[in-house]
Image (cartoon, grey):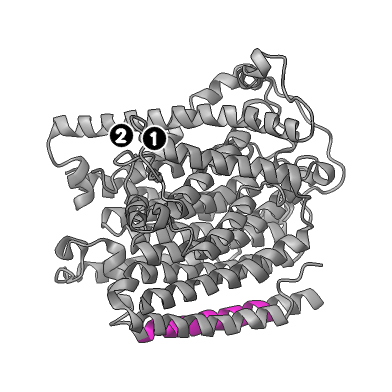
Amino acid sequence: MLPELFFGYFAAAIIIFSLIVVTRRNPVHSVLFMLILFFHIAALYLFLDAEFLAAIQVIVYAGAILVLFLFVVLLLNLKEETLIRRYINQWPMGVVFAVGLFILMFISVRSFLAGPKGEISSVLTGQSNVTNLGTVLYTEYLFPFEIASLVLLVAIIGAIVLAKKRLKS
Amino acid sequence: MLIAGAFGLGALIVGSIFRPRRPYAEKLTPYESGNPPVGEPRYRFSVKFYIIAMLFVIFDVEAVFLYPWAVVFEKIGLYAFIEMIIFIVILFAGYIYAWRKDAFKWD
Amino acid sequence: MSFFETIFAPGAVDIMLNIGIILIKIAVVVGIVMAHVAYATYFERKVIGHMQVRLGPMRVGFHGLLQPIADFTKLFFKEDIIPANADKPIFYVAPVISLLAALSSLAVIPFFEGFVVANLNIGILFILAMSSLGAYGIVMSGWASNSKYSFLGGLRSSAQVISYEVAMGLSLVGVMIMAGSMNLTDIVKAQEAYPLKAFIFPQFLGFFVFIVAAFAETNRTPFDLPEAESELVAGYFVEYSGMRFALFYAAEYIGMIIMACLASICFLGGWNGPFEIPYVPFAWLLIKVYFFIFLYYWVRATVPRYRYDQLMGLGWKVLIPLALLNITITGLIKILV
């Protein structure tokens, strides 16, 4: 009973905060609500006994990516006047697509089957989430891990090229 | 031993412990304006901050890869060391590139 | 669902008992740390006063010993001024975010064997996550105050905090390799086998990077640019007054205490010392923490402030390569030995 109650609260809160994020007039407020949203998502990871993922959710998403968002919002310095018309004219079309997507997702979610219990969950191995994750990531999934470093390399180069271009113009 | 339980609760409870103070302070509070601002206080700032924030995201992700690696280092041994050296060398190339392009220079 | 099993499964009585114990621990930790924060401000004024051949606070009580209480009372009853055109909700919330981030980190710090509010497996990551949250308090207050000084101070400060956070995280990886854990209690126990029961000798480079990054993270001299009195008045909290100002101030000092605790635990062996001090299990930790706090003041009285470009350069060009070097060396030693 209690786990369902907690999950229900966090699921509902995530949906409500997502709605608040997209409807705020002031983008800085949106960023703040997104911060709260990310903390709720981290709490969901915590309930799955994935405390490492919860910490990563806060460090990377809330601590790094959202700070970048905040800087961009502050950099653009949107004035109140430019924000009066918040939604472009195509919003009825948008609603149609959103409803369609929702129905599609609803149908597909209904057909989901519960997968077999994971072999490396902390309940089975008796070790912490970090140890399990590390062991698998650095032996079995070695190649994707090295690819990740290349992706990050591309990101560094991309960030600098884009920012330098902006600096010149 | 208390396990992860206090994580979420702790953060929330610790927050509510100091909160009751504030409404008390507020009782004494009439509204008063500060100095009238001159010009536009929230001006556009250097794109430099933006570059730093992006590089921070990237290096933060790199650090995140290092944490579980450090914890299981003893278990995997030499194999883990070599793969992390490759990882660090690849990212160091990006780091040198950023340095050469003066991304860390502030003027 | 072991999260629930630990707290809720054993039965209704145990639930109340568990929550009660947690609450009492939190109250004790917060109370003690707040008292230390109050006297850390007094201690700072005294130490710096004597270093500059002054006496420091002398009027309130014997040698000014009651000064923090007077300060607190004054701030508590002071008017709370909100500048015109400020973004009120964010202006209200920003100091709370700062203090929340600082106080939450206390939950994972083991003060002596077996005494920790939440013994998390990811203790170090929790502190890093909370310190990244602290950047929000700073940039939000700077933006919400609607003042040029605070806006620039907030921006500078958040850029500084995030730059040094990478170096700090990387400097702790060496400790994690040596201990094979991110749990702070395990880290202290892993150090018992080393000389002086501390990691400082094998991890000297990591320790150096950590200390510099800790100074920058807590916005202390020589990296206190965001609040440089002479150029930015007081940085991001110029517009704050009364209790809200006190919250920022407390958050800064709690941050200092946390960084001192983290340095003591990760590099100096936490509650273990060269010999046992009877009856006071936390004595060694307290001595080490006060050593670091004194170091903060000593540096403040000695070293001039950095320029902003030098500051960013130091973080990105010196500390990060040093931290990576430290990781490589630690890994090599671990494999060879």
Q: Position of residue C283 (x, y in %)?
A: 42, 35
Q: Is residue A33 left or right of residue C119?
A: right
Q: CA distance from mark 2 to mark 1?
A: 10 Å
Q: Is residue A115 left or right of residue B50?
A: left
Q: Position of residue C220 (x, y in %)?
A: 67, 46
Q: Do labels 2 and 1 touch, CB within 8 Å?
A: yes
Residue type at mark 2: give it.
Ile
Q: Residues within 10 Å of mark 1 (few under 14, many from 20)?
A: some
Check the picture and name the quadrant holding the N terminus of chain B: top left
Q: Position of residue A41 (x, y in %)?
A: 38, 55
Specify start and end residues of the magenta stretch as a single range. A143-161
Specify the farthest residue to the front: C275
Residue A20 visible in the current orientation: no
Residue position marked by numbered label 1 in the rendering? B13
Q: Is residue A154 magenta?
A: yes
Q: Is residue B45 left or right of residue B77?
A: right
